[in-house]
Image: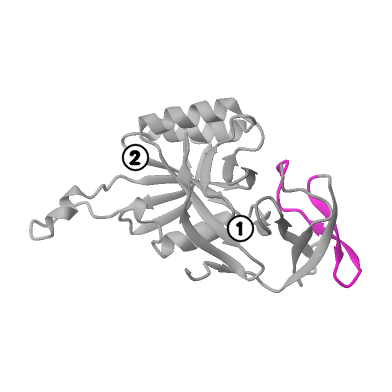
């Protein structure tokens, strides 16, 4: 079992009562107290928003925060009891840690990680990560395998994934014009740069990944087109528990 990439602070168990106005969730804590927590997920949370299910909240001591509690995860029973991460602010933090630890051999060699890099044809978008390799001159005395090393910059976009069909993880769970734009902009970088779409499967009960064609057929069409042009897809499985988050390896890609 791999080590935890991310360790949660103290969490508070409760039962989800309702989510409303996108950002608010009422939760009954184990003590019986009912609190309003911040819901850090603006999407429809298809298949994940289930009132009555167990949840875990974190709590801040920051007096400037209007809501002290944040909804971190919910337990579902789709395949077996599984905690599903709902805090969409976490995947990028966890992926940055993973990149620093070089746990994705598929990415090859890089020695610089830049976050939120401006890119795109109108220079109005930001890619989650740009990975750079400074090895521009190869000494003839170096191992010959280094001569074949791909030194192109890597533009890597992260998408949080929680919608499923049994053990098949799906993205997106709703129409996403923003996601479509990201695919088009990554395609425009090929082949001078490497484009990587990393799907953060925020639950441990899925073994396969596919585009959510029922929710956004155009996104699925664009993803398949991008893959045919050289876009790399990393459907990464993560286990989320009240203890923390660990990497489980890649899901099988089904296009």
Looking at the image, residue 158 sits to the left or right of residue 45; the answer is left
Residue 63 spot, x, y in % from top left: 80, 69
In the image, residue 107 sits, relative to residue 98, either above or below, namely above
Q: Residue at x 48, y 63 (%)?
A: 97
Residue 3 spot, x, y in % from top left: 49, 71
Instruction: Verify whether residue 138 appears in magenta.
Output: no
Q: Residue at x 44, y 54 (%)?
A: 114
**Looking at this view, is 136 or 236 the one in front?**
236
In the image, residue 141 sits, relative to residue 234, either above or below, namely below
Give the SS element for disc 2: loop
- Please provide the residue range marked out in magenta: 22-45
Residue ID for mark 2:
193
Q: Earlier in the sequence, mark 2 or mark 1?
A: 1
**CA separation in Å, label 2 and label 1:** 27 Å
Q: Is residue 164 visible?
A: yes
Looking at the image, residue 128 sits to the left or right of residue 217; the answer is left
Residue ID for mark 1:
90
In the image, residue 190 sits, relative to residue 207, either above or below, namely above
């Amino acid at each position: 079992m791999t080590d935890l990439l991310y360790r949660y602070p103290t969490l508070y168990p409760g039962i989800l009562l309702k989510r409303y106005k996108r950002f608010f969730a009422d939760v009954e804590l184990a003590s019986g107290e009912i609190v309003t927590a911040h819901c850090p997920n603006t999407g429809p949370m298809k298949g994940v928003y289930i009132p009555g299910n167990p949840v875990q909240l974190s709590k801040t001591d920051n007096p400037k925060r209007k809501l002290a509690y944040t909804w971190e995860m919910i337990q579902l029973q789709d395949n077996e009891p599984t905690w599903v991460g709902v805090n969409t602010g976490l995947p990028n933090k966890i992926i940055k840690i993973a990149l620093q630890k070089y746990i994705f051999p598929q990415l090859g060699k890089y020695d610089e990680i830049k976050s939120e890099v401006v890119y795109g044809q109108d220079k109005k978008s930001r890619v989650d990560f740009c990975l750079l390799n400074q090895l521009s001159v190869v000494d003839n005395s170096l191992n010959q395998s280094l001569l074949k090393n791909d030194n192109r910059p890597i533009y890597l976009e992260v998408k949080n994934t929680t919608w499923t069909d049994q053990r098949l993880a799906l993205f997106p769970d709703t129409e996403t014009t923003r996601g479509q734009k990201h695919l088009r902009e990554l395609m425009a970088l090929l082949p001078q740069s490497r484009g990587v779409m990393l799907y953060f499967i925020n639950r441990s009960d899925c073994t396969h990944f596919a585009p959510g064609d029922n929710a956004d057929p155009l996104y699925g069409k664009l993803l398949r087109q991008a893959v045919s042009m050289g876009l790399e897809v990393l459907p990464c499985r993560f286990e989320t528990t009240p203890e923390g988050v660990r990497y489980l390896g890649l899901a099988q890609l089904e296009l």
